[in-house]
Image: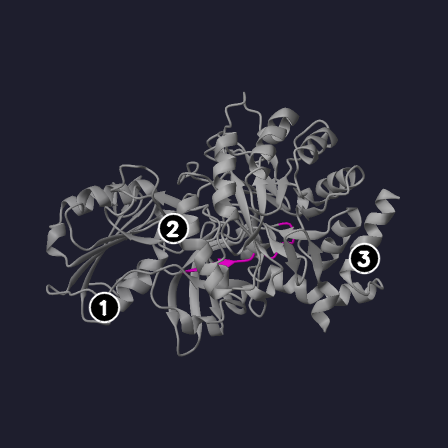
Amino acid sequence: MTDNRLAIKLPGLDLKNPIIPASGCFGFGQEYAKYYDLDRLGSIMIKATTAQARFGNATPRVAETPSGMLNAIGLQNPGVDAVIAEKLPWLASNFPNLPIIANVAGFSNEEYATVSQKISRVQNVTAIELNISCPNVDHGNHGLLIGQVPELAYAAVKAAVSVSEVPVYVKLTPSVSDIDIVAKAIEDAGATGFTMINTLVGTRYNLQTRQPILANGVGGMSGPAIFPVALKLIRQVAQQTSLPIIGMGGVDSAAAALEMMIAGASAIGIGTANFTDPFACPKIIDELPNVMDKYGITDLASFVKDCQEEIRG
Amino acid sequence: MILQEDMLILSNENISPRVYRMALKGELVLDITGPDQFLHLRVPSPDKVLRRPISISEYDKENKCCVIIYRVEGDGLAAVSQMTPGQRLDVMGPLGNGFDISLPFPQKKALIIGGGIGTPPLVGLAEALTSQSISVTVLLGFAQKSAVILEREFSAVSDKLEIVTDDGSYGRQGNVGLLMDELDVMSYDAVYACGATGMLRAVASRTATHPNAYISMEARMACGMGACYACVVHVAADETGQKSLKVCDEGPVFKVGEVVI
């Protein structure tokens, strides 16, 4: 079976292949289901969910950058109760065998706990991606993200882990002076693994108005331009922990996915590439066996194991 | 539905400063349901990750052809403008919901209002209405004479066409609001508008009580098909401020009063 070559097994995630649309780039799956069978995917990281419905930021919310883009959506979502009542059941009834990774966002430890607890009880949610690193909302920490302060990260992760019924992967921001310290705090708090990297932070200006293009002023930068940054940070974290890493940041091809596995990732999130090509994920999945053949990779599970043994010695 | 296709470029002509008219051929034309749906174009430059949403101006299902008219604002569409007949362009579409023309037209009269680069999709609309024996009045506003486009096309599919320019260098000086004030807007069965935000507000303020007034909105988009929430607008009758509609898949056409412009 061809599919076996691509299978990856992680806590909570029995993936038929390692390709997972990244949170925020794929809604709750419904729109992309018009384009292809979502069962082709390893999993889906659904849109960030908070306790209450959020409109998000003012528009414009996106801008283009060389080989990348900025977004400042601002965690727009219908709230956890609507996600549980409408979005997740739709996925469960149409794609009953597809494991879902629920991205949980919040503005307090209580909110992280409440949303994690509720959403982790939904049958098709097999893991949580704890979003402590969205750069587009104010967490009331003097402009700092929870994921930028080890103590705050520890407390938020602890709050989620203690009530979640599924493994909790924590999404790391690249905007830190030393990612090792934050990763260590998150591991100590009981996280199952990491997803990384969230967006970098940047801005663009309109020459005519001399104002930022984004209504929010700044936004999260994603796309191929940040791929080398992701590789560097994934390797850095992989060197200090044995927790699994779901890598993301500018992956737009099977070759890039394999390169990120060399850096230390066990599975791969695909974000901006979905906008450039709505069929990006199935194309990468189709492309993987050929690129694996080219480099003598028989199956991804042993490739990932070999890469990580090399990193950790 | 094929949803995405490498469409064949039949022509790509410069029709006014920075404005191009491109004719495309492909199977996805068969899926177009109405004027002002849009195509999401992949820019032929590897460093451009976002597509460009462009309204469908006219289409011909028999020959599987459609026309888009776009204005070059930056590097992305500049690259598209350099493409030549015979080349293929990666297109997603048709996306969004076009103008609703399946309304009752007891008076057999429709009013169409366009501004600048918002005018192209209205050609197809005027054509569709005219073919249903509805009398079409068209009011168009442009910045100046050199920006005036599609006058001949609109003349062919309307009973009355009036053009204004901001500086008076062509037609009368002023804006379309001025022209609207000279008409009995309520006497038209339907009002359709596409243009810049200011123009849409001017139309909306003059059609607030009209039962069938529609505006087509423009927005910066990423996915173009409803997944990313980049292009949302506030719902007008929503005191919570939390409700939104997406311009890409719930628009771009909205009823006047439905969303905050």
Q: Residue at x 36, y 53 (%)?
A: B252
- The kind of residue on which mark 3 rests is Phe
Q: Nearer the viewer, mark 2 or mark 1?
A: 2
* Residue beneath disc 3: A303
Which residue is the extreme one toward the bottom? B62
* Position in image of residue B220 (x %, y %): 45, 46
The subunit carrying tag 2 is B
Q: Are marks 2 and 1 on the same chain?
A: yes
Determine the CA span between mark 2 and mark 3: 44 Å
* Residue beneath disc 2: B247
- Which numbered tag is attached to residue B130? 1
Q: Is residue B114 above or below residue B93?
A: above
Please indicate whether residue A204 sits to the left or right of residue A58 in the image: right
Give the quarter of the image for residue B46: bottom right
* Crowd tier of the residue under label 2, counting other residues whose Cα lies within 10 Å: few below 14, some 14–19, many 20 or above: many
Q: Earlier in the sequence, mark 2 or mark 1?
A: 1
